[in-house]
Amino acid sequence: MMSDETIHESTMPSREMIVERLVEYNRISKILKQIHSNKSFKFKRLDERLSVLFIVITALLTFLGFTGIEKIHGLIPAIAPVSLVHLAFAFNSLIFLILLLVILNLVYRFGAKSMEHNRAIVVLTGYIRDLEDMIKLQNFDDALGVELVDAMRERYKMVTETLPPSTDKEFYRSKMDLMFKNTKSKNIENPGT
């Protein structure tokens, strides 16, 4: 008859199994990091484009406003005949466009969304770094391996609960982006292979 201690030792997962679980958490975390990197870049680019458009239109409106529509109307016939009504309509349309850009920025908050995803990248990077240290160093007691995996699983759950949501399509695209990035990195590190 076996003792409880013998049964526990025989059902205890091996070091390789524990490392395998940690590697899987690492792999998924890297994909999540890529998702948030993609989204951060996308929202940052949208925010920058919106800001540039806002600045250009505001500067144009300021120039037109200080110059005066009547003076501009007096100068335009030399270039192209435009009625004062059409010129006033164009000026008011630009003012409406500024209002629309401000509302879009308030509703979609591209800059704030970019910062949320940057924060997700920071949190995931810390988690990935800790996982990679554990995988590489394997400085854990075999008897505590299950507790280590449980702790890392709970930390993973906590990290993922705080992340902005993402879709399956973004997950798939990020897997492809990460594969491309890893291949590119290997080619840079080992140019002859």
Image (tube, rainbow, N blue to C red):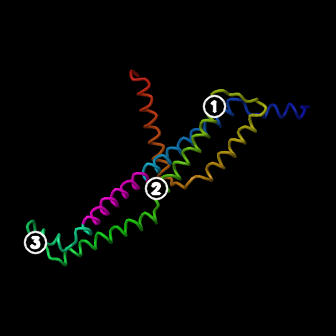
Q: Name which quarter of the figure residue 27 lies in.
A: top right
Other-residue count near label 1 (Cα within 10 Å), few / some / many at <14 / 14–19 / ≥20: few
The picture places residue 38, in percent across and down from the top left corner, at 45, 47
| Quarter placement of the N terminus | top right
Labelled disc at residue 81:
3
Other-residue count near label 2 (Cα within 10 Å), few / some / many at <14 / 14–19 / ≥20: some
Distance (Cα) linking label 2 and label 1: 33 Å
Which range of residues does the magenta coloring cover? 43-63
Tell which tag, 2 or 3, sits nearer the viewer. Answer: 3
User: Relative to 137, is 97 on the left or the right?
Assistant: left
Labelled disc at residue 111:
2
> Helix, strand or loop at disc 3?
loop
- Residue at 69% over, 34% down: 18
Distance (Cα) linking label 1 and label 3: 72 Å
Distance (Cα) linking label 2 and label 3: 42 Å
Which three-letter amino acid code belongs to the residue tagged 2?
Gly
Which three-letter amino acid code belongs to the residue tagged 1?
Asp
Labelled disc at residue 133:
1
Q: Name which quarter of the figure residue 47 lies in.
A: bottom left
Tell which tag, 2 or 1, sits nearer the viewer. Answer: 2
Name the one closer to the observer, 103 or 150: 103
